[in-house]
Image (tube, rainbow, N blue to C red):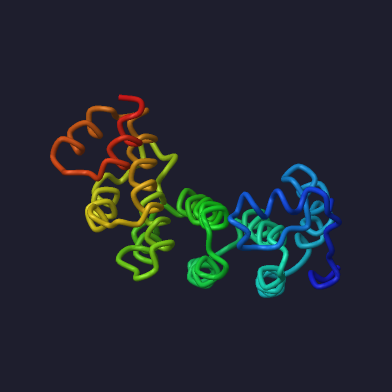
Amino acid sequence: MQSLDFELNGDPTQAPQMAKYMKNQFPFLGLKTPERKAQTKTLLKASRGEDLPTIRVWIDALYQRDAREYQYVAIDLALDHIKRWHFSDMQAFRQLVVQKSWWDTVDAWRKVFADYVKLHPDQKLAVFNLFFDQPNFWLRRIGINLQLLEKETMDTALLSKAILADLDTNEFFIQKAIGWSLRQYSKFDPDWVLAFMAAHSLRPLAMREGSKYL
């Protein structure tokens, strides 16, 4: 199977509502997640017999399609092969993050990078640096949330660095990311989060989100 031969079959009656939820920025086929994943099983299975350059071509081709669900399939494909990727692949995937960017794909890509870091903890700093201090705020959002579900392995120095660089940024999705990271980490180390919030003047949104469980 070639990715260009792969087609999803959606429900046109669902498409307008799904597009509206994403501010009508992207066309949808009308496929909710469970059905999309069911229809993608054959593609994922076929991909497991292919080499990495071929899979990269498939991911790129899928990502360029108009319907939003195909971007989700491309990211699913990247996740399915997470154990096979190299740092050079992470560099290439960063280029896709800034294409057709919105919170749905950006946060899905975050999981790709985070899962890669879990497999290659020695490369955490290198992956973090792909996103830190970038002009595109979506990239910086991934940098802030890169360690989102980490506990014992959290590098608080990197988390602090990412947050402090964007402390006064007005962008909603950045402030939301700051609050999200602090809120999540507060489940594991509330004292660290309390001390961090006491030491720095966070914007109201980040403060509200970050202190939710404190």
Which residue, as the protein is rendered here, is positioned at the far top? 214
Residue 191 relative to residue 113: left or right: left
Image vertical order of residue 208 relative to residue 30, above or below: above
- Residue 185 is situated, as x and y percent measured from the top left of the image, at 35, 35
Q: Quadrant of the C terminus?
A: top left
Residue 92 relative to residue 190: left or right: right
Image vertical order of residue 174 relative to residue 66, above or below: above
Q: Residue at x 71, y 48 (%)?
A: 17
Residue 98 relative to residue 37: left or right: left
- Residue 28 is situated, as x and y percent measured from the top left of the image, at 73, 58
Q: Quadrant of residue 60?
A: bottom right
Q: Residue at x 52, y 65 (%)?
A: 97
Number of numbered labels in the structure image: 0
- Residue 90 is situated, as x and y percent measured from the top left of the image, at 50, 66
Residue closest to the eye, 82 or 19: 19
Residue closest to the eye, 176 or 142: 176
Q: Residue at x 62, y 49 (%)?
A: 21
Residue closest to the eye, 108 or 113: 108
- Residue 204 is situated, as x and y percent measured from the top left of the image, at 27, 41
Q: Quadrant of the N terminus?
A: bottom right
Q: Quadrant of residue 49?
A: bottom right
Q: Residue at x 41, y 40 (%)?
A: 150
